[in-house]
Amino acid sequence: MTAPRKGITRQEAVRRVLLGMTEDRAGYAALQTLLEEQFQATLHHQSARLTALADQVIAAVEPLDARRRQRVSLVTALLGPQGDMAQLFTLLQQDARTTAQRDWAALEQMVLECKRLNARNSDLLTEQYSIMQRVLHGEEDTYAPG
């Protein structure tokens, strides 16, 4: 194992990773709420609300991505370029390892759910846009010769 970045101990690096996971769980819960609000605003064609929510989603994703980058950096510093979270968890005592593994699995599920919600919202927005384009401009082949 390699030593973490200068000025930070192995214990501190692990602590930061675990703390980041806790913060991410709260962050992804908030993101899920925003994505649900975005879906409702899309269903109700609330364009001003959608604009505000888009800004809030971006603001919610930025710290999540920053913590992800920090986590990758710390795990790489501790375990090398092929290191992963499963290997990091082996550095923990059994009780802490079990908790961290459970928390990581929960976090992974939250990430997948946010991706699903985001895809759902994107699909709905795309469908609504397509319908609006057809309403405003008509079908290209509506009056095409046979």
Image (cartoon, rainbow, N blue to C red):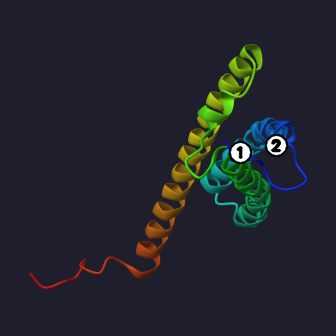
Residue 83, image x and y in percent? 59, 44
Residue 106, image x and y in percent? 65, 29
Q: Quadrant of the C terminus?
A: bottom left
Residue situated furthest right in the rendering: 7
> How many labels were placed on the picture?
2
- Of residues 142 and 123, the one nearer the viewer is 123
- Of residues 108 and 123, the one nearer the viewer is 108
Q: Quadrant of the N terminus?
A: top right
- Of residues 94 and 144, the one nearer the viewer is 94
Query: Which SS class for mark 1?
Result: helix
| Residue 12 placement, left or right of 34 | right
Residue 76, image x and y in percent? 66, 50
| Residue 141 placement, left or right of 53 | left
Amino acid type of the residue that numbered disc 2 sits on in the rendered structure: Ala
- Of residues 132 and 37, the one nearer the viewer is 37
**From what the image shows, is residue 140 above or below residue 83?**
below
Amino acid type of the residue that numbered disc 1 sits on in the rendered structure: Leu
**From what the image shows, is residue 37 above or below residue 145?**
above
Tell which tag, 1 or 2, sits nearer the viewer.
1
Q: Earlier in the sequence, mark 1 or mark 2?
A: 2
**Residue 78: mark:** 1
Question: Label 2 neighbourhood size at 10 Å, few (<14), some (14-19), many (20+)?
Answer: many
Question: Label 1 neighbourhood size at 10 Å, few (<14), some (14-19), many (20+)?
Answer: many
Check contact, mark 1 vs mark 2: CB within 8 A: yes
**From what the image shows, is residue 98 above or below residue 134?**
above
Q: What residue appears at the point 80 percent right and 60 percent down from the top-left corner? A: 59
**From what the image shows, is residue 131 above or below residue 27?**
below
User: Circle 2 is placed at which residue position?
Assistant: 13
| Residue 95 placement, left or right of 114 | right
**Residue 100: mark:** none
